[in-house]
Amino acid sequence: MTSCITILAFSDWRVQDIDELIELVKTLDENLDVIVYAGDDVRRFLSKGQNKFEELANYSKYGVFAVIGNDCSQNDKSILKGNKVFDLHEQSQIIDNFLFIGQEGATKDISLPLGATLYGEDEIHSHLYQMVKGHKNKKIVLISHSPPHSILDTAIRFHHSGGTSIGSTAIHQFIKKNRVILTICGHCHLMGGRYEKLGKKTILNIASHDHNGATGRLAIVKISHEWKEAIVSFSPHIKDLYSVYGLYCIYGIGSKYYKKLQEAGIKTVKQLSLLSSEEISKRTGISKSVVSRWPLQARV
């Protein structure tokens, strides 16, 4: 039995360079057991007839475990079938005492569901319990495009439609009631590069932003049958990694304001937290009404 399983996780690779990712994976000191992709834009990984997931799979022991996202079509699922490439929504995988399962798409039971691959909460509930049937003694690793409801599931685009929490309640309840030691998700770009605990259960959102020039987010996760919790670290190899400390995690900071903050020498959330809204406005030229809540968010 493997003493420790090492996972490289990423999600929502909409604009990032895939070949650069592959080159980076080649240089990692870690001996990867699994590479996990939590969905969206999987078609980008098919280039000139070559499946980039298959190429990535060469650099991990068990290959690539993935699901499609809500913006993917069912036709895109064919890209998740290849040499050492597995669609976890269709077929679970077992490594030692761990059962890896998948939930593709997103919930349609929210105020403004968007996407081509959507499921009702009842469908998600049924699917997850079907996947763990017959594996009572296994610890579970869930790869879901959608986060669980109320955990790392805030989305800016839904702010004006009556709600910002767009995760799945069925996923949340499944995690609470089962032996899910680790959940890897994406979907909500704002929450990417963070993890939270539900008791001793780890929920990692590793989505990347999709604006031009957005940095790709990666995480290394280690799990062991001897440990009660997963260990998460964010890759230091990605330049300008703003996974946990980056300004893009502050609501209202997009590429335009990010550039102005950088030019003013305000480059981290910690730096932002030490300034008043008046100081930020004065240094950047951004209206005080715009920046008024940034320091408070940065201190949370």
Image (cartoon, grey):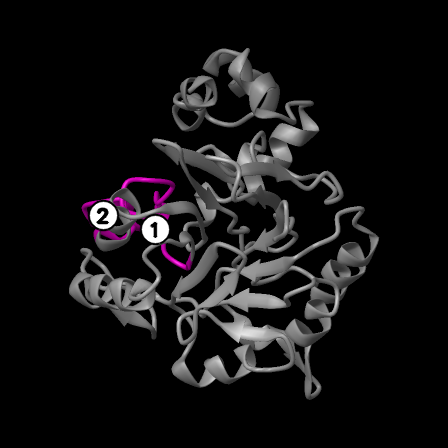
Q: Is residue 136 left or right of residue 23?
A: left
In the image, what residue occupies the spot 40% across and 71% down? 89
Give the label, 2 or 1, closer to the camera.
2
Q: Amino acid at mark 2?
A: Gln
Q: Residue furthest bottom?
A: 49
Q: CA distance from mark 2 to mark 1?
A: 25 Å
In the image, what residue occupies the spot 34% across and 31% down? 199
Q: Which residues are magenta?
A: 143-169
Is 298 covered by the magenta stretch? no
Image coords of residue 179 (percent x, y): 34, 47
Q: Helix, strand or loop at disc 2?
A: helix
Q: Is residue 115 above or below residue 274?
A: below
- Residue 284 picture quarter: top right
Contact, mark 2 vs mark 1 (Cβ under 8 Å): no
Q: Is residue 293 above or below residue 237?
A: above
Q: Is residue 296 above or below residue 55?
A: above
Q: Helix, strand or loop at disc 1?
A: helix
**Quick one: 20 or 122, which is closer to the camera?**
122
Q: Main secondary structure of the magenta part?
A: loop
Q: Is residue 294 left or right of residue 49?
A: left
In the image, what residue occupies the spot 32% across and 57% down? 136
Image coords of residue 280 (percent x, y): 54, 18
Residue position marked by numbered label 2 in the rendering? 173
**Quick one: 175 or 95, which is closer to the camera?**
95
Locate the C terminus and report the quarter of the image it occupies: top left
Image coords of residue 270 (percent x, y): 58, 19
In the image, what residue occupies the spot 41% across and 63% down? 101
Q: Amino acid at mark 1?
A: Arg
The answer to which of marks 2 and 1 sits earlier in the sequence is 1
Residue position marked by numbered label 1 in the rendering? 157
